[in-house]
Image (tube, rainbow, N blue to C red):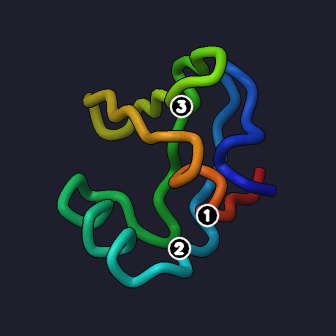
Amino acid sequence: MCLSELRRGQAATVALIPDETLRAQLLRFGIATGSRVLCHAKLPFGPVVLRFGGQEIALGRQLAEQIKVQG
């Protein structure tokens, strides 16, 4: 399942970040393969807002579609 498919309030573990550049960007926020994230909000036609480690991070839908997660 893609990160963009999570529903509000649903938690998941990051399974795969295939793009090397995106992987490096997320690592700056502390998100890597194996990280547990919570979908805090999904804005219609907008970003997916994640809650991770006490912070909120908004990712565009196109980026969120590239990240694979598992429940």
Q: Label 1: which residue?
A: 66
Q: Quadrant of residue 13?
A: bottom right
Residue 16 coordinates in the image, percent (x, y): 60, 74
Alpha-carbon span between mark 1 and mark 3: 12 Å
Compared to 5, does 17 lie above or below? below
Can you tell which of label 1 and label 2 is closer to the viewer? 1
Q: Amino acid at mark 2?
A: Ile
Alpha-carbon span between mark 2 and mark 3: 16 Å
Residue 21 coordinates in the image, percent (x, y): 33, 77
Residue drawn at 50 percent across, 29 percent down: 47
Q: Local crowd at mark 2 within 10 Å, few (<14), some, or many (≥20)?
A: many
Q: Quadrant of the N terminus?
A: bottom right
Q: Earlier in the sequence, mark 2 or mark 3?
A: 2
Q: Quadrant of residue 32?
A: bottom left
- Asked if the residue under mark 3 is in contact with the one under mark 1, i.e. CB atoms within 8 Å, the reply is no
Viewer-side residue, 12 vs 49? 49
- Asked if the residue under mark 2 is in contact with the one under mark 1, i.e. CB atoms within 8 Å, the reply is yes
Kind of element beneath mark 3:
strand
Q: In the image, 43: left or right of 30? A: right
Alpha-carbon span between mark 1 and mark 2: 7 Å
Residue drawn at 38 percent across, 32 percent down: 58
Compared to 71, does 43 lie above or below? above
Q: Label 2: which residue?
A: 17
Q: Which mark is residue 48?
A: 3
Q: Local crowd at mark 3 within 10 Å, few (<14), some, or many (≥20)?
A: many
